[in-house]
Amino acid sequence: MSENSMNLVNQVLDAKEKIQVERFTYDLDWVVSKIKSGQLKIQPAYQRTFEWTIAQQSKFIESLILNLPVPPIYIAENDKAEWELLDGLQRISTFLHFIGEINLLKAIESSQLCREESDLEEFLESDDSDEDLENISEDIPKSPSYLTLKGCDIIPDLNGKDKSSLDAPLYKRLINKAIDIYVFSYTGKDHAWMRYHMFIRINSGGTNLSAQQIRNASVRLLDNKVIDFINEELATDEDFKKTLRLLKRKYSVNQNRRMILEDLVLRFFAFKNNKNAYTKDVKPFLDKYLEDCALGENKFDVDKERLVFKKTFSFLASNCNEDSFKIDDKKKNLYLYEALTLTIAKCIEQDLDLSKLKSESINSFIKSEYFDKACFVSGGKNTLSYHDKRLEQLEKYLKSLGINIKD
């Protein structure tokens, strides 16, 4: 065996010795007891939000009653010997909802537990132009203390049942349902780094997670400073949301399902600060940028970035209108929005006078000689070269207005 091969084998053996995996089989009542005692934390900072609808929750309860196979729960032991849930939030939360223990779900709003329909619409790719906005309700119902089953399709007679009305033998079968639990522990120095990789591998295969939800959860295992800054300060900024409502329907922005606002904030900083690392696929580009910020490999000056972000969207909120991001009569264009936000941010960083740039002149860009529609619409435009061309067109247009951006 060559020296390189021996070195690789030794690396694998060393890693295997540091990673310990224990498998247990316990009933769900036991899991609840561990939550109540504080041994199992089901909502550490990196856990994602609750996504299942009433129908999805009901089908899970139906599966438990029928003793159908369900996926295992994955837990990581932290450096304080506490158990933190890596995967299983939807299942455990559903069980707690059914048995009336939602008080244990401190980080989940009650409204999240009772959504009737799943909103899997991709915010950045959907077209809102044909929607009847008047018929969209902004109200979200309050969640009852106990889940009432709705959507069971193997045993339809379970629909309408809750904890109090479920037959005693079936309820006993439910709480005694055995479930596999895998507990990971790590003896190396890079404890958080290994938990980070465990989380990524366990959660990336799910189809119910948006890319930003994965990032929001996993990057906290490295550092939470930048992601908290994005989530708590910038994604909630009123000028930012006001600007977004010009791009997307009010309902999408207000409900912020699947962390669409946080995704756009991250996208803004990644393209503003690190666009040359972008090729064509946005997801790994944003993943890597956020990861490098968390690790300190990308220097992220929170005070400076806060000022630029807030000034950028304060300007846009005050000077844009319903037509500012339109290329055609109805459809809004993400590339036009992005080019404008990044160009304004650059002007602000260079302390340029933007007093000449009002809504009329912003909207006139698409009618100017500098605008090339082919760079903004149709397929194949999600590349760095087209990204640069869009910014170049807008910068030339601003120059014609007397606003000279330096390279």
Image: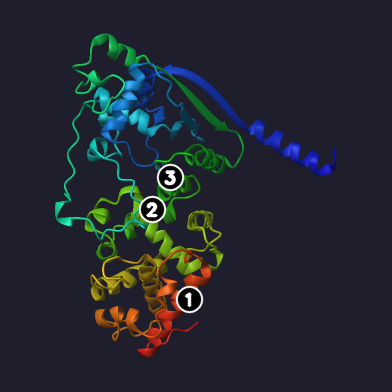
Q: Which residue is mark 1?
A: 389
Q: Residue at x 75, y 40 (%)?
A: 8
Give the residue type that dot 2 points to: Asp
Picture quarter containing residue 100?
A: top left
Q: Are marks 1 and 2 in contact (CB under 8 Å)?
A: no
Q: For marks 3 and 2, give the one nearer the viewer.
A: 3
Residue at figure coordinates x 40%, y 47% from the top left: 210
Front-most of 227 and 49? 49
| Relative side of 389 to 51, left or right | right
The amino acid at mark 3 is Ala
SS at mark 1 in the image: helix
Q: Position of residue 86 (x, y in %)?
A: 45, 35
Residue on which the image places disc 3: 217
**Residue 259 spot, x, y in % from top left:** 35, 51
Would you say 160 lies left or right of 260 here?
Answer: left
Residue count near mark 2 (Cα–Cα under 10 Å), binned few <14, some 14–19, many ≥20: some
Taking the image as shown, residue 199 lies to the left or right of residue 345, namely: right
Closer to the chain start, of discs 1 and 2, is 2
Q: CA distance from mark 1 to mark 2?
A: 33 Å
x, y percentage for residue 221? 49, 44
Give the amino acid type for the residue marked by disc 1 in the picture. Answer: Lys
Q: What residue would you read off at disc 2?
A: 228
Q: Earlier in the sequence, mark 3 or mark 1?
A: 3
